[in-house]
Image (cartoon, rainbow, N blue to C red):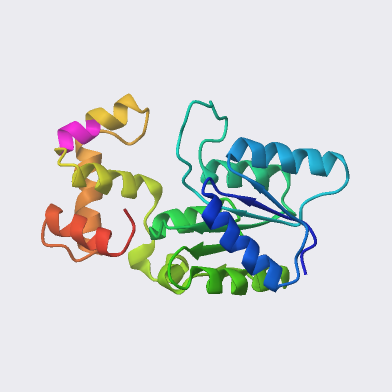
Amino acid sequence: MFEKVLISDDLGSINQGVVTVLDSLAIKNVHQVQYCDDAYLKIKKASMDQEPFDLLITDLSFVSDHRDQIYSSGEALVKALKQEYPELKIIVYSVEDRLQRVRTLVNNYNANAYVCKGRRGLIELGKAITSVYDNHSYLSPQVERALSPKSNLEIDDYDVELIRLLSLGLSQEQIGTHLKSKNISPNSLSSIEKRLNKLRIQFKANNAIHLVAIVKDLGLI
């Protein structure tokens, strides 16, 4: 089983629950931090000292305070650590259950497991730790669809952003202006109209409002 584990969560009560799970698996060398930057620095130092961590369990959302952070979210932390320490196993433990975000963390950033906090969260975390140790991935049941090969989930980050802006009540013209301000392409009115029409057909939506509702129900935004 894992010999050295780091927990990164800004809530001490959550950390304690995770420690209990680790203890039940006979993992005793457990360290805790409440900031993503501290997690990054601790992992970096441990690697330099040739006493690396085997596993990181991290939340995604951290409440901001007076302290400036380079890594303000667990997502940014996972991305950075997996680039520098690809052998490090990482389990995301979060209340976030949006499928698109799960897909990004697993497919793009190579997180090894994604566990949703909840009534069965700690039970699932125990299963995830065992699975990851055996070189298998793990997803909580409520987000398993995130990696489904079905075409209705095959939309990219650009599509998600379009639908998110649509859900905020922006017109296609306003969406175009927003995309241009963020240097996101394509941003022409005709391109946006074509993409939204394609998404309406793909999701069998009657109109823009119906499209937003369907995509929200799927947990993509």
Q: Residue 192 is drawn in which quadrant?
A: top left
Residue at 15% x, 41% y: name it: 169
Q: Is residue 173 visible?
A: yes
Give the total of numbered labels: 0
Q: Is residue 149 visible?
A: no
Residue at 75% x, 54% y: name it: 87
- The image quadrant where one finds the N terminus is bottom right
Decide whether residue 70 is among the magenta residues.
no
Q: Position of residue 15 (x, y in %)?
A: 58, 55
Decide whether residue 173 is among the magenta residues.
yes
Report whether 97 appears left or right of 106.
Answer: left
SS majority, magenta: helix
Of residue 26 and residue 92, the one placed in the foreground of this image is: 26
In magenta, the rendered stretch is 172-176
Q: Position of residue 62 (x, y in %)?
A: 48, 42
Report whether 125 appears left or right of 81.
Answer: left
Q: Is residue 7 above or below residue 139?
A: above
Residue at 81% x, 43% y: name it: 46
Q: Residue 63 is drawn in which quadrant?
A: top left
Q: Position of residue 182 (x, y in %)?
A: 35, 28
Residue at 26% x, 58% y: name it: 216
